[in-house]
Amino acid sequence: MGILKEETHDSSSSSMTYATRWKYENLRNISVAAIVLIAISLLTLLLISIQGRKQVYVVVDGQVKAIETHHTMLRDMFDEQAIVLRPEDKVSMALNSSIKDGDKVLIQRAVEINVTVDGQSKSRFTTQGNVKGVIHELGVSLTEHDKVFPALTSKVTDKLDIKVVRINKQIVDRIEKVPFRVIKTSDSTLLKGNVKVAQNGQPGTIVHHIEKVYQDGKFVSMKKVGTEVQSSRQDKVVLVGTKAEAKKKPVLASSEAIKKDTSKKSSVIKASLSNNKLSKAGVDFTYKKVLKNVSMTAYSSEEPGIGTRTASGTRVTEGRTIAVDRNIIPMGWWVYIEGIGFRRAEDTGGAIKGNKIDVYYDSLQHARNFGRKSGRTVYVIGPTKPQLN
């Protein structure tokens, strides 16, 4: 019979202790390895994150803002920072551009403005810095006479109103007929009391060039820019006889007849004086009264604040219109001014008081050259202009 080896209690206990010890030691090593692996992974991710972050500078309305981001595209960074753009805003880089550390991005915010051109107004957004830039951006063409409000150099601000006023200038011709004068001259070959026309009269023609100004199609002002003599006048020359008739033998008259003749001549002279008849510039007329020592000045519609309509409702006309004191000369009455000629009282003025007259001229320079004159005699005629003989 064989001999069986007896298992003892000690050998079984030793086997269990070795297994427990091996398991414990390996579990600890596994835990340490896992911790080390996690730490390495976190460190790697941290390094990748640090290496991927970048600093970008964004300039908005003159303010610089430094932004740290890990995004590589500009649009993603704007989304991350909640930066909202209008379609009219301008960005120095395209939104789909890649960004890198140290990049500088400029944003120009558009402002709302209102523009009125050719009578039409519209609102729009713009990033232009001045009014000139806006006009160029809109493609609006300007002429040398057009006006822009505010000025082209003005800065563009939010809610700014810009207006373009179209200026149109037109030259029109005003034709004036210049009446001829009647010149009477003595002729010793004609018998006294006889007259003869030596030269027929022809009126002259003057063309005044008038500049009319329109703003956006509406008439605003006018002024004379030139004068041209189209045809010269030809004065009518009348010869007046001065030759005395042959003397007849005197017939003695009685003293009573002489007295009657003298009395008759005296009454004729008095009647002539009472009729206030006068002949000036070849025109015979009767006047109502005579103004002595009249002072005179001149004015023009080219002066600021002086219009082209008179106080009586007529249009001012050179060679006709004068301003008077209506208490001295009634409105609409004609007068003869020594050294000037026939004029019509059509206007008044705050400074025209008493024996003072203001003579109208189209040209402001002519009015200034007229200056101030005094000591003139003026014959007040009436509402009807005297006619040539």
Image: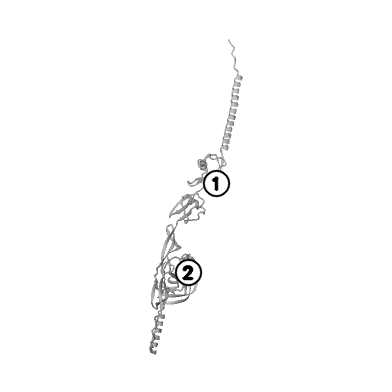
| As drawn, 280 above or below 205 | below
The circle drawn on residue 25 is: none
Residue extending furthest top?
1
Question: In terms of secondary structure, where does tag 1 sit?
Answer: strand
The spot of residue 64 in percent (x, y) is: 56, 46
Residue that label 1 marks: 59
- Decide which of tag 1 and tag 2 comes sooner along the chain: 1
The spot of residue 380 in percent (x, y) is: 43, 75
Q: Left or right? Give the position of 150 relative to 11.
A: left
Circle 2 residues within 10 Å: few <14, some 14–19, many ≥20? many
Q: Along the line of sight, which residue is nearer the eye, 63 or 212?
A: 212
The circle drawn on residue 298 is: 2
The spot of residue 366 in percent (x, y) is: 48, 67
Rendering quarter of residue 65 = top right
| As drawn, 116 above or below 384 | above
Circle 1 residues within 10 Å: few <14, some 14–19, many ≥20? some
Q: Is residue 132 visible?
A: yes
Residue at the image position 44 percent from the left and 75 percent from the top: 379
Q: Along the line of sight, which residue is nearer the eye, 388 or 325?
A: 388
| As drawn, 223 above or below 182 | above
Q: CA distance from mark 1 to mark 2?
A: 66 Å
Could you tell me the amino acid type at mark 2? Ala
The quadrant of the picture occupied by the C terminus is bottom left
Colouring used for the render: one colour
Residue extending furthest bottom?
255
Q: Is residue 387 visible?
A: no
The spot of residue 116 in percent (x, y) is: 45, 54
Could you tell me the amino acid type at mark 1? Val
Q: Along the line of sight, which residue is nearer the eye, 124 or 57?
A: 124
The quadrant of the picture occupied by the N terminus is top right
Question: In terms of secondary structure, where does tag 2 sit?
Answer: strand
Q: Left or right? Give the position of 246 relative to 101.
A: left
